[in-house]
Amino acid sequence: MEKELICVSDSKATHRLILLHGWGADANDLIPLGQELIKGLINQKIELLAFRAPQQHPEGFGRQWYGLFPPDWAEVPSAISDLQIRIKALCKTSIPLEKSVILGFSQGGAMALAAGCDLPIAGLIGCSSYSHPNWTPPKNSPPALLIHGSKDEVVPCAASRKIFFALKTNQKETDFVEFDGGHEIPIELIPRIQKVLKKWFI
């Protein structure tokens, strides 16, 4: 059986970066990105965690957080609840929620937004993300960084703009970076993500 999460830890870790993969990927998909991100944070000891989505992808490879094509929005509330339970269980260890950041890509970004905004985490990063139907940010949502390609044909860039304005309306610390590209996390944006992690990991 595949592992439900991948953990790359330092015995002296004081902070945690949680990775949520996209539709059809698996827990190992974002590990190289996570490792590159924490490599540049020399003043912090960071534990890297990548969760594996609970459902098998309908085509038999990879995983999904809930059915997406067509979207099964009825599954979303329980998917969010299950993910929050998993995150809270891990954060009962020496690294609390307040020193954890969640980064999600695509469907994982939607899950990061939905689950993370209701948790007292240090921050959340949504890459090529979208919000679930009727989503509104809670008043006490954490700071956020949204990045999205202007040429994304899988999840339109307008989806992240919508999230950005919703969070800004709540007067939350939110940044939105639009890059010239598609459904991806370009290597050129790694320094930008590292910058916000340095700010949040205090």
Image (spheres, rainbow, N blue to C red):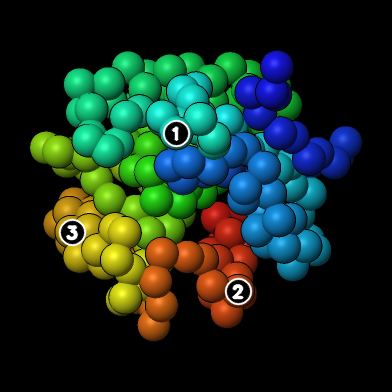
Where residue 61 appears, x then y in whole percent? 54, 35
Where residue 146 appears, x then y in whole percent? 37, 62
- Circle 3 packing at 10 Å, graded few (<14), some (14-19), many (20+), is few
Q: Amino acid at mark 3?
A: Lys
Q: CA distance from mark 1 to mark 2?
A: 29 Å
Q: Earlier in the sequence, mark 3 or mark 2?
A: 3
Q: What residue would you read off at disc 1?
A: 59
SS class, disc 3: helix
Do the numbered discs 3 and 1 sit on residues whose CB atoms are within 8 Å?
A: no
Q: What residue would you read off at disc 2?
A: 187
Q: Does 41 sit left or right of 181 as displayed?
A: right
Q: Amino acid at mark 2?
A: Ile
Residue lying at 36% horizontally and 22% vertically, measured from the top left: 79
Residue lying at 88% horizontally and 36% vertically, measured from the top left: 11
Q: Quadrant of residue 166?
A: bottom left
Residue lying at 38% horizontally and 43% vertically, measured from the top left: 107
